[in-house]
Amino acid sequence: MTQSGRAASLADLTLAEAGRRLACGDVSPVELVEASLQRIEMLDPLVHAFITVDAQRARAAARAAETRIRAGGYRGGIDGIPLGVKDNIDTAGLRTTSHSRLLQDHVPDEDAHLVARIAGAGGIVLGKTALWEFAQGRPSWDLPWPPAANPWSLDHQPGGSSSGSGAAVAARMVPAAVGTDTGGSIRFPAASCGLVGLKPTYGRVSRRGVHPNTFSIDACGPMARTVEDCAILLGAMAGHDARDPGSIDEPVADYRAALTGDIRGVRVGLVRHWYAGVATAEVEAAVDAAAERLREQGATVEEATLDPLQDYVDCKTVIAISELYAVHERDLKRRPQDFGASLRSMVMAGALLLADDYIQALRWRAELASRLLAQFARFDVLATAGWLSEADAYRPGEVGAVHSRPPVTMPFNVAGNPAINVPCGFTSEGLPLSLQIAGKPFDEATVLRVADAYERASGWRDRPPPLIASEYA
Amino acid sequence: MTRQPSSLSREEIALLARVAGLDLAPQHLDELVKSWHWLEPVLGRIPRQRVRTDEPAHVFDPRKFMPTKGDT
């Protein structure tokens, strides 16, 4: 195999595969980083997944990891693996912009807690990925960097707000990346890009050093091509942080060990009324088929009835816009022209909200969350669609467009429990579709176990995007 | 009981924005009018008929705000 052929092959490894080869000395962190850099150089001019790539820093980290591993200091997990980090997460000495002109030259002094944990586990931050402005705007062309494109079809959006993390992993520039999720910002791009994306329980991963969207809802989590890779990355990121008031001191499970492949007897509550007749016909058929597959694997699947999807969306929207205004008020008054139009229009609306609106929405949240979480007396997990349509086509110049269908991810942001999206098929045009599985608070292990068992049985993960397939043509 | 839809005019929205401290350029006011008219029906759907003791999803734990030595 030629050197460039080997690099392309290494870039296609999953995180777990790369780890196994690192462990036996078959590959080095330096080779993995070079393979990622080569893939980025080739495809990122089309995909725009990264805002900043720090090759020098990544190469230095890779050399240090290589020396340590050769000396017998291999740590397992993400050790020696190149990763992408969403650009609303602080990285000491490395520009962190939130994809906004407001922070165009912002270089943090300190790593976010989760970045420090990744570094401590030997992970190598290759660069910072594109997003919707401050994880809240929409794909915009009035910002200093273009929006990311979907590797499955460059004319389509990769979903958001962790759009660059999704695009980077789908284009196999990195085996995994970190995203943030306030209303579906990990799971939506995972659905759009044919990936696995996990929003952990609120408080599972520290938000310290992560630019706030909505303090009371924000969560950080892994995005990867496989459930196993998400389990590995979550294990590195998760842990209590006494300096994050939202962090909760619960033991971190061995998520990888939870992936037994056995879901016999698992009780699945299928929330069909959130997608049936609302989603596209192809989504509805794919999610119904996925539920049937879970049943064939030994799970019991019964329909569950919860509050209407729109209730969660309305509740989350009022809470989010209220908190968003408090976050951005100072900049909005001093330099409104430096916001993208999409984010600015949403932030401004917060100026007209009353304290009563916010508190009543928080009361509603308590009610909605209680009813949703009560379902776990009857079920081990809930299943529904991961998104209600395939990826949206890009319409350049369209600013601030809202989703045509309600975000089916939001109920689990309101309730704060863990939820994962896993691929469950493709449209007739070859765009990915997604199944969502949610669990009890802090029971990420069961969510991952069910998703992994489904992933193994379904085989959807093995299909590469046309962009990658054409690289070998 | 729900918040009554007000269908605020552009001038009323501009006044409320000024009260909130926003002195908006005409283009930005256009954006606010559009986004407010999107948000207003959402506010109308928040349930407000509650007993006094209904707790919001907010708990304050003072231990979380004690000084710490640093990262754990």
Image (spheres, helix red, strand yellow):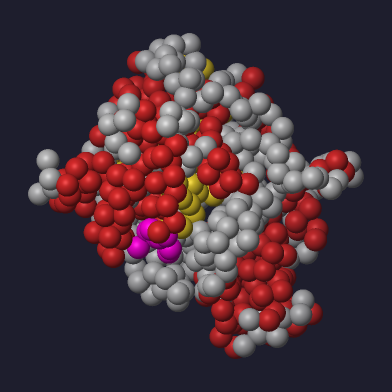
Q: Looking at the rendering, which quadrant does residue A374 occupy?
A: top right
Q: Nearer the viewer, residue A231 or B42?
A: A231
| Residue A287 point in image, percent of width and height | 37, 33
Q: Is residue B23 left or right of residue A385?
A: right
Q: Is residue A81 left or right of residue A246?
A: left
Residue lying furthest front in this view?
Answer: A71
- The residue stretch that appears in magenta: A48-55
The answer to whether residue A441 is left or right of residue A341 is: right
- Toward the left, the furthest residue is A473
Q: Looking at the picture, does residue A443 appear above or below residue A138?
A: above
The answer to which of A213 and A11 lies nearer the viewer is A11
What residue appears at the point 72 percent right and 65 percent down from the top-left corner?
Answer: A326
Toward which corner of the image does residue A43 lie, by quadrant? bottom left
| Residue A254 picture location, percent across and down | 54, 23
Please tell me in which quadrant of the rendered image residue A330 appears: bottom right
Q: Name the side, left or right, on which B52 lies relative to A428.
A: right
Magenta span includes A318: no
Q: Nearer the viewer, residue A409 or A38?
A: A38
Residue B30: image location, x then y, percent = 57, 81
Residue beneath the point at 55% across and 61% down: A93
Residue A267 locus on image (x, y percent): 51, 17
| Residue A98 seen in render | no
Q: Is residue A97 above or below residue A111?
A: below
